[in-house]
Amino acid sequence: MISSTFGDDFRPVVEADMEAGERLVNFAQAYSEMWKTTHHEGGRASRSFQQLDWVGIALTNVNWRIYRWRMDITKDGWFKRKRAVLVPEIVDSLTVPLASISSHGVRRYRPGPSARADLADMFDTDVGEVIGISVQFPDGETDVSSPLTEFETLAANLEATLSGEALASRTASVAEALGELARLHTSGILTDEEFERAKSGFVGASVEVVESSAALLRQLDSLRESGILTESEFRAKKWDVLSRPG
């Protein structure tokens, strides 16, 4: 695997795109192979390798995220080959909740000659082995690979996150967080709108954070009831707690 700073400028862009209560676990650049299918007379079809489509992969505490970046084409001199340069600007993205992932696979393999040539051009060395991650979910699947050490770490953390024990623990934590949020809503501390908007933040937080946030909200409600806080002060402080549960 290759140790590289490729992607350091992209991480802040990913973090700025995350939801309240969502925390970045790992980020790495990866690629998917783009192929062209040509149909010939007699029904025969052939596939030819086109290029590597580089994407950013983010594993957070609640989501599997894929980002496609803006790509600029540069050319140094008349006889130099064109190079694609990734720019830390999001063109489109896909967010898959970890809880919705039905299956996944992690494998090590050696890319085909065409992909290996593109990788060697990118990193100025023969990359040899890469790691591939496939993720299946209700609306489709993603299949990405990378030779980078940070992607290897991301793959290991994804495996650990989606293991049976971790999945059961996370499911119980989500249920408890939503239950606490529902109790605050039923008691009138949270409005319908606040309840809906606060779900993602509470679900992404730890049990300890959920409990402390709920306790603080109840304290604020008591201060409002006793007249120490005005209604507007209560709403402002309440949303300050809800918007930063993690």
Image: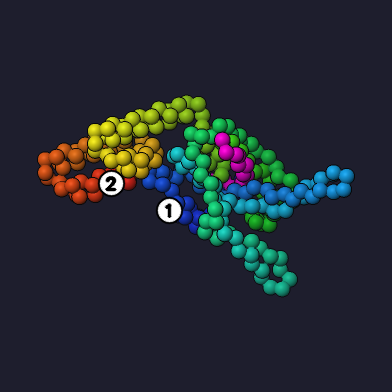
Residue type at the position of mark 1:
Ala
Label 2 and label 1: CA atoms lie apart by 20 Å
Magenta-highlighted residues = 138-150
Looking at the image, residue 117 sits to the left or right of residue 84; the answer is right
Q: Quadrant of the C terminus?
A: top left
Residue 239: which numbered mark, if any?
2
> Is 20 contained in the magenta span?
no
Numbered mark located on residue 94 in the image: none
Mark before the other along the chain sequence, 2 or 1: 1
Q: Is residue 109 left or right of residue 65?
A: right
Task: Tell me, yes or no, whether the highlighted magenta stretch contains residue 142.
Answer: yes
SS category of the residue bearing label 1: helix
Dot 2: what SS? helix
Question: At x 45% / y 54%, what residue is drawn?
Answer: 12
**Residue 220, image x, y percentages:** 19, 41
Query: Which residue: 53% across, 50% down?
Result: 93
Q: In the rendering, at what x and y percent does residue 185 appear?
A: 28, 35
Please say if 93 is above or below 178.
below
- Indicate which disc residue 16 carries: 1
- Looking at the image, residue 42 sits to the left or right of residue 59; the answer is right
* Residue 5 seen anywhere in this rendered image of the structure: no
Closest to the observer, 143 or 161: 143
